[in-house]
């Protein structure tokens, strides 16, 4: 079985299914600290030691065995689809990445040519119509997710339920799924259920937002980016995310969950 996006502490105290744009940098740093008593110096996604990761060959059999035995506490973190897709747009489409280039090379020029998206110049990335460009990007995201055209969907805007399902389809089971919007409560619940080599004081943990500063600041309230057509598209591509993780599909202004997450239902719905 394959378990993409799965991380595990070297002490095998806890397994985490990474979901992009859902506090994954902060969670990864917390897991690293829980084993080593210090945070990783840099972006935790770049760490090649100190955490087992599925994309590291030596970690795969260790992660697979632990997932299938269900021997380690297993969790993930989810986010409101409206704020997550906006975050992906400003970071990955509008932003200049750490290497000084646009994300995924020719993707932004393709968006500009085929969808009429504008992102501003490299000297002034704020100088563009954010709302119009985002709505055009949303059409592109829908096309990648529903039709795999003009390319396969990117991990940063493919559905949260799709990410979460890979561990379930491989025979794993989540002990806890919590909301980014209630991060402290959710992460503390995880910490209360494991006994790592180093205790974590969540109140003293900084927030590691590695994408901060990549792109322009959002200039408008969330709801202003979503007209009736945009809301329809969000329903079309993220229906399962809204439904399974308790978010309001009809009110982009309400980022908070409105119903609890039913773990049994999540496992039943996402088992393939």
Image (spheres, grey):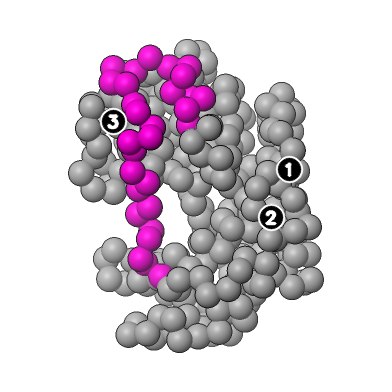
* Residue 57 seen: no
User: Mark 2 touching mark 1, by CB under 8 A?
Assistant: yes
Q: Name the residue nearer the viewer: 125 or 60.
A: 125
| Residue at the image point whose x is 52% and y is 28% from the top | 75
> Where 130 falls versus 45 (above or below)?
below
User: Which residue position is annotated with label 2?
Assistant: 254
> Where 147 falls versus 269 (above or below)?
below
Q: Residues within 10 Å of mark 3 (few under 14, many from 20)?
A: many
What distance separates the C-alpha of mark 2 from that of mark 1? Answer: 9 Å
Which secondary structure lies at badge 1? loop
Which secondary structure lies at badge 3? helix
* Residue 35 seen: yes
User: Which residue position is annotated with label 3?
Assistant: 33
| Residue at the image point whose x is 51% and y is 61% from the top | 87
Magenta span includes 60? no
Q: Position of residue 8 (x, y in %)?
A: 38, 27
Q: Which residues are magenta?
A: 187-215
> Where 30 falls versus 107 (above or below)?
above
Q: Residues within 10 Å of mark 1 (few under 14, many from 20)?
A: few
User: Which residue position is annotated with label 1?
Assistant: 258
Judge from the rendering whether residue 236 lies leftward or rightward of residue 126; answer left or right: right
């Amino acid at each position: 079985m394959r378990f993409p996006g799965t991380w595990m502490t070297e002490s095998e105290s806890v397994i985490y299914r990474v979901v992009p744009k859902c506090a994954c940098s902060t969670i990864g740093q917390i897991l690293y600290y829980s084993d080593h008593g210090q945070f990783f110096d840099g972006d935790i996604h770049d760490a090649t030691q100190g955490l087992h990761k599925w994309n590291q060959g030596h970690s795969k059999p260790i992660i697979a065995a632990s997932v299938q035995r269900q021997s380690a506490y297993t969790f993930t973190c989810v986010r409101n689809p409206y704020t997550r897709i906006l975050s992906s747009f400003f970071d990955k489409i509008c932003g200049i990445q750490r290497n000084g280039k646009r994300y995924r090379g020719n993707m932004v020029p393709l968006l500009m040519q085929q969808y009429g998206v504008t992102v501003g110049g490299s000297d002034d990335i704020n100088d563009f119509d954010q709302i119009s460009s985002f709505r055009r990007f949303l059409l592109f995201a829908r096309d990648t997710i529903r039709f795999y055209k003009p390319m396969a969907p990117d991990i940063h805007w493919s559905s949260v339920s799709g990410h979460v399902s890979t561990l379930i389809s491989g025979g794993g089971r989540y002990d806890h799924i919590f909301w980014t919007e209630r991060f402290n409560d959710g992460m503390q619940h995880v910490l209360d259920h494991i006994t790592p080599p180093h205790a974590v004081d969540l109140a003293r943990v900084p927030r590691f937002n590695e994408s901060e500063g990549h792109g322009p600041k959002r200039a408008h309230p969330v709801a202003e980016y979503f007209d009736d057509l945009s809301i329809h598209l969000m329903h079309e591509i993220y229906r399962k995310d809204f439904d399974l993780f308790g978010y309001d599909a009809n009110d982009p202004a309400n980022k908070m969950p409105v119903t609890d997450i039913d773990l049994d239902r999540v496992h039943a719905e996402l088992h393939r």
